[in-house]
Image: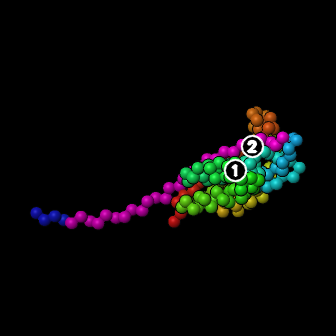
Amino acid sequence: MSETPAAPSAVIPSPVIPRTGIGMDVHAYAAENEPQPLWLGGLFWDGERGLSGHSDGDPVAHAAADALFSACGAGDLGTHFGTDRPEYAGASGATLLAEAARIVRARGFEIGNIAVQFVANRPKFGPRREESQRVLSEAAGAPVSVSATTSDGLGFTGRGEGISAVATALVYPAG
């Protein structure tokens, strides 16, 4: 009996599997006797009480960066920009987001999108949403959407003690 040669096996490409990440950031309002400017969603909010933090305290940009790190398994915000890194003291959230995007791409990923929602009683975000999304999208080099809500008077955000933000990011292998 003669054996029939096996047919060459077809090379089946691996599917591109996107990865998702979650980021969260919380900042308290700065003490009344130590005023800070408010940076939120990559924007300066004139006349608003600012947040305390090692950098500019922008929870929207910070949560977005953290979501990127989570999606590609690159640690977290503290790993890259923590208080042990004095060069990031006072850094803008948009700068940190741009650096996070660079790190993600250096690890072989592209960014699909980032979505952020923050919880606060103020400032009124709607009139500046598009501006914020543009600034953050430019920093990330990918679409960033931002939404805002209140907590109906509940918790520390409802009591006006600070702002929290949660973000999701989608990344996928480059190439």
Q: Which residue is mark 1?
A: 62
Neighbours of disc 1 within 10 Å: few (<14), some (14-19), many (20+) = many
Q: Nearer the viewer, residue 57 or 167?
A: 57
Labelled pair 2, 1 in contact (Cβ < 8 Å) = yes
Q: Image check: 169 left or right of 86? A: left
Q: Secondary structure at mark 1?
A: helix
Which residue does the image show at 76% across and 35% down from the upper left? 156
In the image, taking residue 149 as reference, residue 10 lies left or right, namely left
* Residue 22 inside the magenta-drawn segment: yes
- Type of residue at label 1? His
* Foreground residue among 2 and 137: 137
Dot 2 falls on a residue whose secondary structure is strand
**Magenta extent:** 5-31
Q: Which residue is mark 2?
A: 27
What is the x, y in percent for residue 59? 73, 48
The N terminus - image quarter: bottom left
Between disc 2 and disc 1, whose residue precedes?
A: 2
The answer to whether one can see residue 118 in this image is: yes
Q: Quadrant of residue 99?
A: bottom right
Give the image quarter of residue 120.
top right
Query: Would residue 51 be counted in the magenta stretch?
Result: no
The amino acid on which the numbered mark 2 sits, given as a three-letter code, is His
Residue that appears at 57% across and 62% down: 106
Residue drawn at (60%, 52%) of the image: 69
**What secondary structure predominates along the stretch shown in magenta?**
loop
Q: Residue furthest left?
A: 1
What is the distance, in whole Å, between disc 2 and disc 1 at their CAs? 10 Å
Residue 126 seen in the figure: no
Q: Residues within 10 Å of mark 2 (few under 14, many from 20)?
A: some
